[in-house]
Amino acid sequence: MFIKKPIIRFVALCIFGLLQTALSYAQESYPSKPIKILVGLAPGASTDYLAREIGRGLSDRLKVPVVIENKPGANTIIANNTVAKSPADGYTLYLTNIVSAINPWVYQNLPYDFKKDMKNIILIGVADNVFTVTPKIGINNAKEMIAFAKKNPGQFSYGSSGVGTIHNLLMELIADQAHVQLNHIPYKGAMPAITDVLGGNLSGYFGTISSQREFIKKGDLKPLFVTSAKRSVYLPDVPTLAEAGLPAIATGYWMGLSAPAGTPDSIVSLLNKEINTLLANPELIQKFNGQAIDPIGGTPKDMDTFYDSELKLWKSAAAAAKIEPISLK
């Protein structure tokens, strides 16, 4: 049967109109079901803590459950890729962190392109980092650590949350500058690594202050340096990298929230507004400070600008550390 082109065009326009109406309704009614935030690390880390506090606050404000799903592995690549390949409807989000700006310089053939496949919502907070050692090793500062490593080739081992993380790259820079060998042992979370340091199976650990502060207070871990530009208010007696005579890179372990590319601006704006409101809450600020996390906030564009600056920083750091990108194929 012959159908005239105007009729076909009319039907197509009707279908398009219905789809647009459905999409508009979906955006206006957002959220109407549980929201899931994926975290690329094991429970217990600062990233996990921040995600759960933000999730709890969003759930109260948006009146829907906000579920935190830990999906550790492959230096957060598994979780990030899962979100990048998810529907861009605002119901699957990613707790972005500093590793998102490091991975492009550490791995080849990533299954996603963060700049193209993800859409930033907000920079949530920054946690200062600290490197600690077991007091049993008799090292009190960075110079003594370097001296120990030179005197005992291959015997100084340290743990971090994974290959190519801020902690791994910084220690590689330190090792390269000092011409020593530091053995890196990657872990999926802070506590397993800290437990090994406490048990004498590792010389030291590089991670957030919050994950180590209680052990530092008890004297079970000895802090050698922090990565903030100035001494951290949480560990005022511990020198910075520059003060310790090490590469003067000043950056904290930052965390934000991102969504799959294509997520409607209306949804991004709503989430950004609600999280900014949460970050201004004195109760949440106190909770964050209790974990040595400084709240940030701002617009999606602010996070885009910040992310671009971090990409440049870690590209330079990876080059200086002579990192050979690992192929994922």
Image (spheres, rainbow, N blue to C red):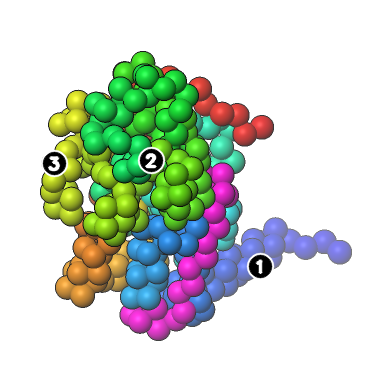
Specify the amino acid type for callout 2. Answer: Gly
Q: CA distance from mark 1 to mark 2?
A: 68 Å
Q: Secondary structure at mark 2?
A: strand
Single out the mark in the foreground, 1 or 3.
3
Identity of the residue drawn at 21% across and 75% down: 283
The span shown in magenta is 59-81
- Residue at figure coordinates x 52%, y 61% from the top left: 70
Q: Amino acid at mark 1?
A: Val
Instruction: List x then y, in percent, for residue 93.
Output: 47, 61
Percent x, y of residue 279 = 23, 67
Query: Between 329 and 266, which is closer to the camera in this rendering?
Result: 329
The mark found on residue 11 in the picture is: 1
Q: Where 37 sits versus 104, above or below?
A: below
Specify which label sits upstream in the sequence, 2 or 3: 2
Q: Which quadrant: the C terminus?
A: top right
Q: Is residue 42 visible?
A: yes
Q: Viewer-proximal residue, 321 or 310? A: 321
Q: Are marks 2 and 3 in contact (CB under 8 Å)?
A: no
Q: In the picture, which quadrant includes the N terminus? A: bottom right
Give the residue pinned by disc 3. Answer: 230
Q: Which residue is mark 2?
A: 204
x, y percentage for residue 94? 46, 57
Circle 3: residue type: Lys
- Up-down: is 11 above or below 256? below
Among the two numbered marks 1 and 3 on one chain, the one whose residue lies closer to the N terminus? 1
Q: Earlier in the sequence, mark 1 or mark 2?
A: 1
Q: Secondary structure at mark 1?
A: helix
